[in-house]
Amino acid sequence: MFLLGYDIGSSSIKAALVNADTNEVVGIAQYPSVEMDIISSQNGWAEQQPETWWANLILATKELISKSGVDPVDIKGIGISYQMHGLVLVDADHNALRPSIIWCDSRAVDIGDQAFETLGKDKCLTHLLNSPGNFTASKLKWVRDNEPELLRKTHKILLPGDYIAMKMTGEISTTIQGLSEGIFWDFKNNRVADFLLDHYEISADLIPDYTSAFQTTGTLSSSAAELLGLKAGVPVSYRAGDQPNNAMSLGVLESGEIAATGGTSGVVYGVVDKKIGDSQSRVNSFAHVNYTESQTRIGVLLCINGAGIQYGWIKNQLTQGMSYIDMEKIASTVPIGSDSLRILPFGNGSERMLGNRNLGSHIINLQFNRHTKAHYYRAALEGIAYSFVYGINMMKELGLDIGVLKVGNDNLFQSSIFSNTISSLINADISVIETTGAVGAAKASGIVSGIYSNLQDAFKEQKVVAEFTSNDTFTEKLTESYGQWTSDLENVIKNYN
């Protein structure tokens, strides 16, 4: 008996199969092998074709089944994790009407900020837990204002995971968690946020019927099964945004537990049992995967746009194809603080934790007779790590108590320089766990069918592949370097203003 999970990212589509009897991963596939295109026809815009996600999911599924040798008849559940905050418009025939406006698109920043002021910060924070900001609801308002003819043709609005579930089942639905991440959910009244839709002059009829994250919303249709090489009738029984799903995959389910990832962007995600919001909108609060009306589980999300993308840029520009492992070895020849070379990694659009400022990346104190490529590699890693610490300290101000940080084994946390820097500066252990978002989604699909009795049962067996502990030997030098970095950041912000 097997469970199938997907992770619908903006870079690629990942698929995983889990043996539900042994809890072992029997196969993982990814398509395409290079990053999917992002359409950016104007500065700050980012779009993708939903049809491309579906086409690549079909290819990833066929590769997974071929590689694993699993008989599709033995697959008993499907779970979906997806890139958060995207907007998909579909007509009554389930056709996408335009490219999806995805998570890193910043065209709706001003729309959300104006709504925050007009509706009132207190109302937004108590009902939405957030400013409407640059989230899905504000992106929909942009479509209303700029593409009204498309909105008139729109039957329903979907998040990326809703679109994939629709393609699989032929049914349209969303989740409370999804509405929360789009800033469509009123936490105070436990319903769709009609007051925000009214303010944006958007009909509530565009919102699909909603369920919880753990509920069968349809079964695999015959037409979809034929395309995927699967058996019709498999229940699609779990759906969640990538960051809540990643946290769940790492076993982060209860108040006080913290997860992080260091991919293209950097994320720290902590669970609390209170409906809290940040008045400065530096971090955001959403319904966690196990949120219910009777059990408050809120995920507090810190997102840093300029993270792994900066290190990838350094690799592409300076290394001529060198591996990240070799970059790490070379960076290790340079002392903590990179001989005073410092890099601010904020070159990937507006940074929410910096007040939606688009600072750009900055290389500071470069000395031509002193600094080498090795200094660049280390300063890049340290700069990203310092940005994590800067954001984590904000989360501490909101009451998150960080004891152990759980992270996956497929991103920046594989770097000892990166992980030791964060661990020592926040005085917390880091556990690197062998899992992926697609694996987590697969396991989660087994909850509804009763294969697992609960979430704790599904994620009880986790393989810790590395651990990093706060090191007093490094802390003094790191604290000094971090202080210089934050001073540089404050000066750049001052000049920006």
Image: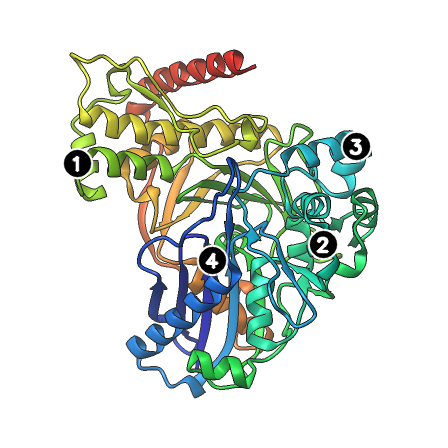
Q: Secondary structure at mark 2?
A: helix
Judge depth for marks 3 and 2 and give the one in front.
2
For the residue carrying disc 1, how many other residues have a C-alpha within 10 Å: few (<14), some (14-19), or many (20+)? Answer: some
Q: Nearer the viewer, residue 230 or 457?
A: 230
Q: Earlier in the sequence, mark 3 or mark 4?
A: 3
For the residue carrying disc 3, how many other residues have a C-alpha within 10 Å: few (<14), some (14-19), or many (20+)? Answer: some
Judge depth for marks 3 and 4 and give the one in front.
3
Residue under numbered circle 4: 249
Picture residue at 20% right of the left edge, 37% below the top: 327
Tag 1: amino acid: Lys
Q: Nearer the viewer, residue 343 or 426?
A: 343
Q: How many marks?
A: 4
* Separation (CA) of disc 3 from disc 1: 50 Å
* Separation (CA) of disc 1 from disc 2: 55 Å
What label sits on residue 378 in the rendered view?
A: none
Tag 3: amino acid: Asp
Instruction: Tell me if residue 372 comes above or below residue 143 in the rendering.
Output: above
Q: Secondary structure at mark 1?
A: helix
Q: Earlier in the sequence, mark 2 or mark 4?
A: 2
Residue 26 sits in quarter? bottom left
Residue under numbered circle 1: 329
